[in-house]
Image (spheres, rainbow, N blue to C red):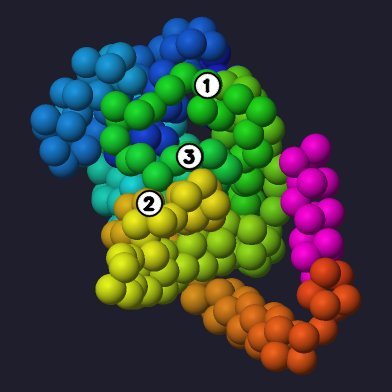
Amino acid sequence: MFTDLRQIRRITIWGVGLIGGSLGLALKKNGFGGERVGLGRNISRLENALQHDAVDSVTTELREGIRNSELVVLCMPVEFIPTCVARIAEVVDTQHYPIVITDVGSTKAALVERVEEYLIKRASHAISFVGGHPMAGSHETSVSAARATLFENAKCILTPTENTDVDALQLIKNMWEFIGAVPHLLSPKTHDLLIGAASHLPHLIASVLANSVATVETDSGKALDFAGAGFRDTTRIAAGAPALWTGIFTQNADVLLPLIDSMIDNLIEFKTLLQTDNLAEIERVLLEAQVIVKKRGEA
């Protein structure tokens, strides 16, 4: 198995939207000399990816899409990834050539467990899977928003387990480094806890906040009519694709539920401070948040 990306002749990107398209553009920008194949269900979207130079060729046929590919990157909603791995295995096992599969999904524990259980049960030695999650993106999902620099200096979390092939892990690590990302290794469960708090919970809160503000109106107008930069900055991520985030939330529900409880406790505590007119404690809470945000901005 190759571990050097420069030895790879063909990479298949299954799902050429924002992330998949940006990956294809980044590979070319940084000098990848092999073929970038776009695989998907919608030929018009694939042709759009081709026009944006995100891939070199496109197909809707799985067998053709992964033929002679040494690496497949799955860029679709998390709930579909295990099924796609299974479909690839059915093709690869009949052709007897090794292939490395990775993904860009925002949840990992349930996904990696399902994939590994399937591959172990199938006793397939032709396929190696490495869970991955680049910490980069946008509320946009189309390849039209893709850019070659999306992953530069961005963290990319890889989630190996005791079943992960070391050469496959090195190849995926090298791929992300090749396009300028910074790989970090975490267990699948640790990934889901940390990203649940840092990414999934903020998106959930932004969505709830947007819906809550939308309910406030008087004869003089709606609250949304007077919303400014603060509302825009706080709720921007709620513009993300609902179908994509529904899968993320349900896949990571075990992590999110206690985080929501903690958030509710914090809101109730702040409510009590307001009710008791506790100015000193209100300022303390705001100051702690200010320090956290400023430090994060300087990092």
Residue at 82%, 84% in the rendered image: 278
As helix, strand or loop, the secondary structure at mark 3 comes to loop
Q: Is residue 298 magenta?
A: yes
Q: Residues within 10 Å of mark 3 (few under 14, many from 20)?
A: some
The label shown at residue 240 is: 2
Q: Position of residue 124 (x, y in %)?
A: 42, 51
Give the foreground label among 1 and 2.
Answer: 2
Left or right of 281: which side holds 164? left
Q: CA distance from mark 2 to mark 3?
A: 10 Å
The label shown at residue 149 is: 1
Res. 287 image quadrant: bottom right
Q: With respect to residue 53, does 296 lie above or below?
A: below
Q: CA distance from mark 1 to mark 3?
A: 11 Å
As helix, strand or loop, the secondary structure at mark 2 comes to loop
Left or right of 236: which side holds 181? right
Q: With respect to residue 26, does 44 lie above or below?
A: below
Q: Amino acid at mark 2?
A: Gly
